[in-house]
Amino acid sequence: MTFKRIFAFTLVLLIIACSALSASAETPPYSENFNSLKDMVAALNKYDEQYPYYEGYNFNRHSAADEHLEYRQVIDVGLKDSDMKPAEYSFAEMNYGYGVDITSTTFYNADKSDRVMAMVHYGYDDVGIKVKLYYAKTNDDVSTFDEGVLDNREYLICKYDAEYTDYYLVEGEYLIWLRAFMETDDDLLNKVSIEYADAYIPVNVRDNEAWFEKTVEKGYIIGDANADGELNIRDATTLQKYCAKLSKVDKLVADFNGDFKIDIKDVTNIQKKLAGLKYTCKRELYPVTYSYVGGVETKLIESTTDYAGPFSNSELALIMNYDGNVESYINVFNTTEEFEAFFGKNIDRYDEEFFRENSLVYVYRWYSSSSFTWTPESVSFAYGLLCVSFHHNTPKNNEFIECALSNNNLFYEVKKADIVGLKGICACELIEAHI
């Protein structure tokens, strides 16, 4: 192994180790228990401030390629007319960076000999719930099951002989899962009460057509903190009030400079932009999805495409300047000003003359091995939706996988006239696996 490969391999290991330590230092209280719902709600509100996930937006894109983040209201589960009383509350994030998955309440009888745990799963849609219920009742360990509708809520009861019984209760796009570690009868379902608590949590859910159309219709303008449809000095004032805890803002648009925080730096960069000074704005300008399939005919746009990577050979690898590695990114630049605000510099190829008639579609992918590459393919456009497709190539079975950081920059040069009315982006990632 050459010195270069040894160095690259060591660097990858150091980055992974540092990331693990960093994640450990910032890990939210997965297993922390609370004595009351009020205490858990207070912790959830604090959690949302400490680990801010914006609705539909996660810059580091830890989310799966066809998922987005949205806020859902916390559910409080009770057992009315029962000697089982709530004694413990908790919430959990199953995977770091994916939003909160579960809140739970544990009920005990007086001498704590019997126990029922009620877990609310938030990251479901209609399809996900049906899949979960199907696999629950076809589990080999299930001795019997019963299903039906109670109080307009679909339910499923799975018995595991004498060990325990699982109750699944559907509440809209929530799945309430009760596990009784004791002998029970079906009357337990009649005792379940559901109330909505005064808290919202970020949840990772699958993209769908309705979500994407709703998102693009909202028409975000990055930095438009007061939502008046334009970027002006009133937005800087609104952000200053937010920093002083005197107002609220839409977190999606308020993080102007894209450092995953909302603070005075966003105010300063908005003021710089308005004053015609150099500013920083490393943000997605349009909502992005990876699985939207619209029932419309798209027109293929003729474009000039370019690929650069790994980062050691790339002229525009400055996305690594972020705290931590940004794994994926997509954007559209319409001016030299926007381009320089993102990369921190300009290059001759994309000057004012280029942007007079053209836009630049930029796709970024980071990987820990330079053997994995991304190459641009095509661009199409219809009804405000820009569809960008590109290939993800893996090495052939006999090729060596080199451990060297890969910083892949894909560029599509398109005519501005071809993407008039751009509202959102669909990134189509085609995987070519060689086995």
Image (tube, rainbow, N blue to C red):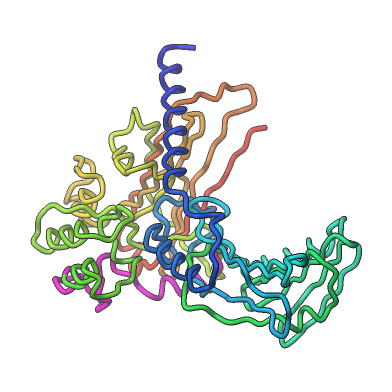
Q: Which residue is depicted at the point 19% across and 40% down?
A: 348
**Residue 130 seen from this side:** no
Is 431 drawn above or below residue 242 in the view shown? above
Q: In the rendered view, would you say 178 is above or below 368?
A: below
**Quarter in which the C terminus is drawn:** top right
Among all residues in the image, which is located at the extreme bottom? 151
Q: Residue at x 71, y 86 (%)?
A: 152
> Residue 20 in the image: x percent, y percent?
47, 38
Residue located at (54% from left, 54% from top): 30
Q: Quadrant of residue 186?
A: bottom right
- Which picture quadrant has residue 125? bottom right
Q: x%, y% of residue 221?
A: 29, 68
In-front residue for pair 174/319? 174
Residue 174 percent across, percent down from the top left = 62, 72
233 within the magenta span:
yes
Q: Nearer the viewer, residue 306 or 346?
A: 346
Residue extending farthest to the front is: 111
Q: Which residues are magenta?
A: 207-236
Can you tell which quarter of the image residue 305 is in? top left
Side of 162 relative to 121 (left or right): right
Q: Residue at coordinates 39% horizontally, 36% vertically from top-left?
A: 407
Residue 163 appears at what percent x and percent y? 85, 60
Q: Per the image, is 256 magenta?
A: no
